[in-house]
Image: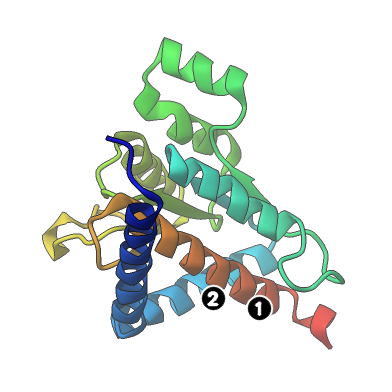
Amino acid sequence: MTPSPSALANLLAERLAATADLLERTRADHVLLEGCVRAASRTAEAIAAGGTLFICGNGGSAGEATHLSGELIGPFADKTRPALPAIALGFDPSAATAVANDFSFDEIFARQLAGLARPGDVLWALTTSGRSPNVLRALEVAAERGLYGVLLTGALPAEAAPRGVDQVLAVPSTETPRVQELHLMLGHFLCEAVEALATPSSRA
């Protein structure tokens, strides 16, 4: 049965209420907020020292990876500052399909990191479940190569946090669309803070 306009309006109101509730719970999560500040500060320090930010994720999180890299290469708020080095992994189709075909889909981000990343770089890894094998593998390689690893995920038991991750940013929800909405908001904060911290002279 096709839903009526009023039913769809009610559904939208429910979704907005769910997101508003999650926003409030996130705002009250001081561990998460402090973690975001640390992640932004470490990323800005790495970029200011000549490092590169890598970002990865699957599906909607892949879209967010390209969105956030675009915010840093282009201006987020300050159109006078230089481009900042940010690369969304997995968007070279020849490289991604070669790695998936010859090795495993689990290696598509890790293999790119192995070829491009240097000690002191940063990885922002997005997985709403916290269980995506290729994202976790990328975090492993990041740790091996001396990168600062940030995991943006949904609600995780403390014991479920992957080893080798320097900062976990866990949105207090397990509902994928809501987690992705908050990841974009947190990602925007990270970009704004990195822009301000890595290029302070452009705001003088």
Name the mark on residue 141.
Answer: none
Residue on which disc 1 sits = 197
- 162 left or right, relative to 148: left
Q: Amino acid at mark 2?
A: Ser
Helix, strand or loop at label 1? It is helix
Residue that lies at the very extreme toward the bottom in this rendered image: 204
Q: How many marks?
A: 2
Badge 1: few (under 14), some or many (20 or more) residues near its Cα, within 10 Å?
Answer: some
- On screen, residue 92 above or below 152: above
Q: Quadrant of the N terminus?
A: top left
Pointers 1 and 2 in contact (CB under 8 A)? yes
Q: Amino acid at mark 1?
A: Leu
174, above or below 27, in the image: above
Q: Residue at x 30, y 39 (%)?
A: 132
- The mark found on residue 41 in the picture is 2
Residue 196, image x and y in percent?
68, 78
Q: Residue at x 81, y 84 (%)?
A: 203
Sequence order check, earlier mark of 1 and 2 = 2
The location of residue 114, given as percent across then percent down, is 50, 35
* Furthest-top residue in this view: 102
Q: Is residue 53 above or below residue 27?
A: above
Which secondary structure, mark 2?
helix
Image spot of residue 72 (x, y percent): 69, 59
Q: Nearer the viewer, residue 146 or 6?
A: 6
Q: Is residue 118 visible?
A: no
- Front residue of 193 and 199: 193
